[in-house]
Image (cartoon, rainbow, N blue to C red):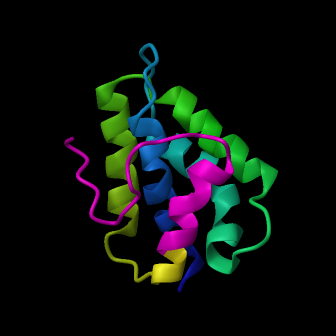
Amino acid sequence: MANSGVVKLVLMATVWVAVLSPKAEAAVTCGQVVSNLTPCVSYVLNGGKTVPVPCCNGIKTLYNLAHNTPDRQTVCNCIKNAIRAIPYSKSNVDLAAGLPKKCGVNIPYKISPSTDCSR
């Protein structure tokens, strides 16, 4: 799997962090999504005993940035567009899906490539 594919998978996985953040308004950009999730690439690509601190910091930052439904949908769509044409394995999906919990961010939805950003 290409590194860019892993970045895109990581972005998709953390969309759920942003989807559930009940905060005030903020304008989230795709650039912010990529910037905050790039530190997660090596973990999603290779696994490991612990998630790198910069990765968890990025996940928590996205959780706090996506304050309203349009922002959460923007994060989701950025991730979906990024991973659309990139192949990934079940292992990569599983690692990405576990990131929020491992970083201490609780989300009630399963992270999946079939995420519906309109919901």
Query: In the figure, 75 relative to 13: above or below?
Result: above
Residue 29 picture location, percent across and down: 45, 37
Residue 13 picture location, percent across and down: 47, 57
Query: In the figure, 4 relative to 19: above or below?
Result: below
**Residue 19 part of the magenta segment:** no
Instruction: Work out which residue is located at the far left of the displayed protein and give it.
Output: 118
Judge by depth and name the residue closer to the eye, 7 or 24: 24
Residue visible at 43% across and 48% down? 15
Query: In the figure, 55 relative to 4: above or below?
Result: above
Q: In this view, does 13 lie to the left or right of 45?
A: left
Q: Quadrant of the C terminus?
A: top left
Give the main secondary structure, helix, strand or loop, of the magenta stretch: loop
Query: In the figure, 36 relative to 88: above or below?
Result: above
Magenta stretch, residue numbers: 93-119
**Residue 118 part of the magenta segment:** yes
Residue visible at 33% across and 60% down? 81
Residue 23 picture location, percent across and down: 46, 18
Residue 99 picture location, percent across and down: 60, 56
Residue visible at 53% across and 80% down? 91
